[in-house]
Amino acid sequence: MNPWVLTVDYENETITVEKRNWYFIGINKNIIAFRFIRNIRVDEHLFGANISIKATGGWVEAKYLSKNDTEAFKNSLFEYNKGRNNHIIFS
């Protein structure tokens, strides 16, 4: 049971990071638009990975994700960036 959920919405160009509250009663959500993202850092561990996203206001983290999920997240963002001819969103 992973308390962190990472969702990418390509239509609205947002990334949502959800974290289950300590008592599993509610959910905290951070929604970041692609245009405010400055850096995405993936920190891989022995059994999982953490993702840190730097936006204009600070850092947002999603911890204890599987390595396959983080690799799919990274590859999908790079593929989306390749399809954008107007400007570079992620480098």
Image (spheres, grey):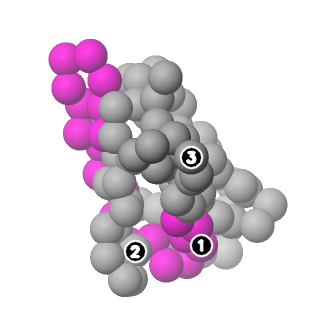
Mark seen at residue 25: 3
Q: Is residue 86 visible?
A: yes
Q: Residue furthest right?
A: 11
Q: Residue furthest left?
A: 46
- Secondary structure beneath dot 2 equals strand
Which residue is pictured at 24% across the width and 31% down the height? Answer: 44
Which residue is pictured at 59% across the width and 41% down the height? Answer: 76
> Residue 74, image x and y in percent?
47, 41
CA neighbours of label 3 inside 10 A, class few (<14), some (14 to 19), many (20+): few
Residue 50, relative to residue 8: is it above or below?
above
> Residue 52, image x and y in percent?
32, 54
Which residue was labeled with disc 2? 55
Residue 77, relative to residue 3: is it above or below?
below
Quarter of the image that includes the C terminus: bottom left
Which residue is pictured at 67% across the width and 75% down the height? Answer: 86
Left/right placement of residue 1 relative to residue 16 reads left
Q: Amino acid at mark 1?
A: Ala
Which residue was labeled with disc 1? 33
- Secondary structure beneath dot 3 equals loop
Query: How would you classify the magenta stretch by its main secondary structure?
Result: strand
Q: Amino acid at mark 3?
A: Ile
